[in-house]
């Protein structure tokens, strides 16, 4: 069978892979992208975890549930009385599904526009010959063989499950089921107080579920700056999320009606949690199954990741790996930037990623966002730093919007004043953090941020005030 030859073959069309494919095509290369994702309608779909069962549907449900909570409980603060706010869950889920379809079809359009061939099926390596990498794609019509001068592995990740606790996505759910519960459970249990546990736990709490989160670690949101995790703990528990830290999960019994989870609390006392549904959100594992990496003399490491250098090159010449399948944070924008970097490297350019300036966001309410180092990391490094913090409570726009919880904290080098980290807990933190990322990319000082004119009234003034506070000269406090 004759093989079609490409300059670049990308395996996986999540945010890392589809962006790599588009950038490579923009740079004039002949590109194909293999993708096997099948959606619940049985159709093949582009977009990976992010568009189908991750970032996009979760943010749609976060937005809908936030609107419901506001209508049902908070519009009274504005002098607007609403009675009888009701949830039409089927409509809410259909809206989310509609957004997913729009976005995934949008990538099909982008593939056509950029003349990228979609190889519809599961790709595996067959070997190397004449300086080319051989790949076989199992499609509905049989097997396609392609030869690639360069390969970008972007196979992403899947939910980690707990041993002995099968996920049926009805009663026991991972992210896929948790985004599509057919009814609002009366009692919802969540194992893992990480990003998914908090975001999706918030969705179902807002819609009326009594949510209990069981977390193994003794600390809450350990990756965040401590002042942010303390504030978040205060706000989330006040909102009604029950969170238990330092727990050990024991036997979980499931039935058609629900789950019964035996667990041990931080003091060592035996406890039982009964719930209608359970979300297991204990991290994600890289996807390398069935890739036949051995055929090109490549192997995943002991945790399942494909080993790469700082430019996402594997040890096999002309084979790269990007996104969740390699080290670093499992974030869509991190994968996208790696995809762009690798496409540009292949084209002979000299791109670079500063992993320290990749922002993080947790889309709870209030949102949490940060970039750079935390205060505890700077202390551990023995770096001399100054900190400036300013609350949204002292900002007119925040008060006007009834969004006065939280603060911005800027950390800067004690000698040079270079911004080393920015931490936000507050409404719109996901957008506010970009200013900090830009500042850090340009090696700005806190004084640089403080000297820039910010619009009034706006939440962004709090960023400026926090930067001024580094030098103990906040103006409105
Ligand atoms: P993926 O998106 O996992 O895509 C990999 C693709 O490769 C899949 O489509 C898969 O079908 C395909 N594939 C795998 N193996 C093969 C093969 N052999 N042949 C053909 N195709 C193959 N990140 C954020 O930055 N912001 C968020 O708000 C956010 N929210 C999230 C919410 C949830 C509920 C979840 C689960 C994740 C969220 N993430 C978020 C993380 C984000 O989704 C991932 O970091 C991102 O999708 C990783 O992109 P990727 O391209 O590396 O992999
Ligand atoms: P996570 O790594 O964020 O959190 C998992 C939590 O589960 C941790 O706190 C861990 O200590 C806990 N845990 C692990 N094993 C446990 C056990 N046996 N019992 C109790 N607790 C246990 O992983 P999560 O929430 O599954 O999300 C996966 C990844 O997806 C995230 O790390 C993130 O990279 C990405 N994501 C990003 C989002 C964003 O950017 N807003 C949103 C959702 C997911």
Image: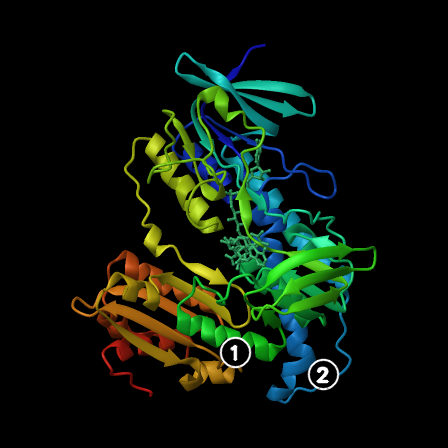
| Quadrant location of the N terminus in the rendered image | top right
Please tell me which residue lies in front, 63 or 227. Answer: 227
Q: Using the image, determine if residue 401 lies above or below residue 116.
A: below
Q: Tell me if label 2 and label 1 are in contact, CB under 8 Å.
A: no
Would you say 86 lies left or right of 106 here? right
Q: Disc 2 to disc 1, how far (Cα)? A: 28 Å
Q: How many marks?
A: 2
The image position of residue 404, as x and y in percent, is 48, 82
Tag 1, which secondary structure? helix
Would you say 129 lies left or right of 283 here? left
| Quadrant location of the C terminus in the rendered image | bottom left
Q: Earlier in the sequence, mark 2 or mark 1?
A: 2
- Which residue sits at x=24%, y=82%? 472
The image position of residue 467, as x and y in percent, is 29, 74
What label sits on residue 409 in the rendered view?
A: none
The answer to whether the beta carbon of the residue marked 1 is less than 8 Å from any atom of ligand 2 is no
Q: Residue furthest left?
A: 415
Tag 2, which secondary structure? loop
Disc nearest the viewer among 2 and 1: 1
- Ligand 1's image quarter is top right
Please tell me which residue lies in front, 189 or 91. Answer: 189
- Which residue sits at x=39%, y=35%? 343
Please tell me which residue lies in front, 27 or 274. Answer: 274
What label sits on residue 234 in the rendered view?
A: 1
């Amino acid at each position: 069978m004759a093989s079609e030859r490409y300059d670049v073959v990308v395996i996986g069309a999540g945010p890392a892979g589809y962006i790599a494919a588009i950038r490579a095509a923009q740079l004039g290369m002949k590109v194909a992208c293999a993708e096997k994702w099948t959606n619940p309608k049985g159709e093949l779909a582009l977009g990976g975890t992010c568009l189908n069962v991750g970032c996009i549907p979760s943010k749609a449900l976060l937005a809908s549930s936030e609107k419901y909570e506001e209508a049902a409980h908070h519009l009274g603060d504005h002098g607007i009385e609403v009675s009888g706010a009701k949830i039409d869950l089927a409509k809410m889920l259909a809206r989310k599904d509609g957004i997913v379809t729009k976005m995934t079809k949008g990538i099909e359009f982008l593939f056509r526009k950029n003349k990228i061939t979609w190889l519809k099926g599961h790709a595996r390596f067959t070997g190397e010959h004449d300086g080319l990498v051989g790949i076989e794609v199992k499609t509905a019509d049989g097997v396609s063989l392609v030869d690639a001068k360069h390969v970008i592995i972007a196979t992403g990740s899947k939910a980690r499950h707990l041993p002995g606790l099968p996920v049926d996505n009805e009663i026991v759910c991972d992210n896929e089921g948790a985004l599509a519960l057919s009814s609002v459970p009366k009692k919802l249990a969540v194992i893992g107080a990480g990003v998914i546990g908090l975001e999706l736990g918030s969705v179902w709490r807002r819609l009326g579920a009594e949510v209990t989160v069981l977390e193994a670690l003794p600390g809450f949101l350990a990756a965040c700056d401590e002042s942010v995790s303390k504030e978040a703990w205060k706000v989330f528990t006040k909102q009604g999320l029950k969170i238990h830290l330092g727990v050990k999960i024991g036997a979980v019994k499931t039935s058609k009606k629900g789950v019964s989870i035996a667990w041990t609390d931080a003091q060592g006392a035996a406890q039982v949690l009964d719930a209608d549904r359970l979300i297991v959100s204990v991290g994600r594992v890289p996807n390398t199954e069935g890739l036949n990496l051995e055929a090109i003399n490549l192997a995943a490491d002991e945790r399942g990741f494909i080993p790469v250098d700082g430019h996402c090159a594997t040890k096999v010449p002309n084979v790269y790996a990007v996104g969740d399948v390699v080290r670093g944070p499992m974030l869509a924008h991190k994968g996208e930037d790696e995809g762009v970097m690798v496409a540009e490297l292949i084209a002979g350019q000299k791109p670079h990623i500063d992993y320290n300036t990749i922002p993080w966001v947790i889309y709870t309410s209030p949102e949490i966002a940060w970039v750079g180092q935390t205060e505890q990391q700077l202390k551990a490094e023995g770096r001399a730093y100054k900190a400036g913090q300013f609350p949204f409570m002292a900002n007119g726009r925040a008060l006007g919007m009834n969004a006065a919880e939280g603060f911005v904290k800027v950390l800067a080098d004690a000698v040079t004043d270079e911004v080393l980290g920015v931490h936000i807990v507050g409404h719109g933190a996901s957008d506010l953090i970009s200013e900090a990322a830009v500042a850090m990319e340009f090696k700005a000082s806190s004084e640089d941020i403080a000297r820039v004119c910010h619009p009034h009234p706006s939440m962004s003034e709090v960023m400026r005030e926090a930067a001024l506070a580094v030098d103990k000269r906040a103006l409105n406090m």
